[in-house]
Image: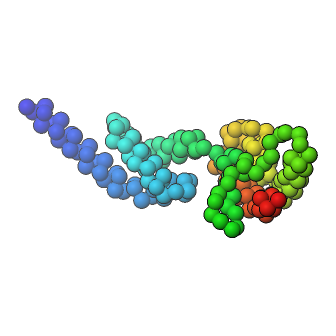
Amino acid sequence: MAAQAQYNAGSIQKDESLTSTIKKERRSLLAFINNRIPALEDAEDILQDVFYELVQSNAVENTASWLYRVARNKITDWYRKMKPVRLDDISVNRQDDDEALLLADILPSMETTADKQLFLKLISQELTEALEELPDNQREVFVLHELEGRSLKEIAEITGTGIKTVISRKRYAVMYLKERLKSLYNELLTY
């Protein structure tokens, strides 16, 4: 009976300690995660995962540093699970309607008809010019990922930058190319 009472007292003390730690660290830990994750919903999910790890763990020394270490690991896992944006997935909206088409829909197949060869040449020239307009670091990431098929992790190692920086550079390159090639897309649809 005394052992049960002692266990209950220890359990209550642990619960109070966890509650206190969560209240104390929640705001700053969420800010830490949200600075590294673009969507607040995802940041809150990661925060919950971190606190779940805390509850599941046994005694943790230096709780604050442990929480931030777990948060960094969860953020890394989150980025690993992210599906990179591929050129084939980009949709373009025509100005006269809201119908979205994938960029792959307007790229001609590799058949050898004269019209298709002309289209391919035109698209290739426009894409080359658009790529040259990108900042060097964005162009490098785009070419390595889209044209050479390198993984984002490989690109991070090649460029000596963090994976988040690589993802950001790729995103800005795709956004620019999408906007830059929109007029070509509209011209090809009216052909």
Q: Quadrant of residue 26?
A: bottom left
Q: Quadrant of residue 112?
A: top right
The type of colouring in the image is rainbow
- Residue drawn at x 23%, y 45% as measured from the top left: 13
Say whether residue 156 is left or right of residue 10.
right
184, above or below 49, in the image: below
Say whether residue 130 is left or right of residue 178.
right
- Residue drawn at x 68%, y 51% as measured from the top left: 102
Q: Quadrant of the N terminus?
A: top left
Q: Position of residue 58 (x, y in %)?
A: 34, 35
Say whether residue 95 is left or right of residue 73.
right
Q: Is residue 121 visible?
A: no
Residue 49 versus residue 178: which sits nearer the camera? 178
Q: Residue furthest bottom?
A: 96
Residue 142 versus residue 43: which sits nearer the camera? 142
Q: Position of residue 43 (x, y in %)?
A: 48, 53
Q: Is residue 56 visible?
A: yes
- Residue drawn at x 86%, y 51% as measured from the top left: 119
Q: Position of residue 22 (x, y in %)?
A: 35, 52
Q: Quadrant of the C terminus?
A: bottom right
Say whether residue 14 is left or right of residue 160.
left
Q: Position of residue 18 (x, y in %)?
A: 31, 47
> How many circles with numbers are drawn on the protein?
0
- Residue drawn at x 29%, y 48% as measured from the top left: 17
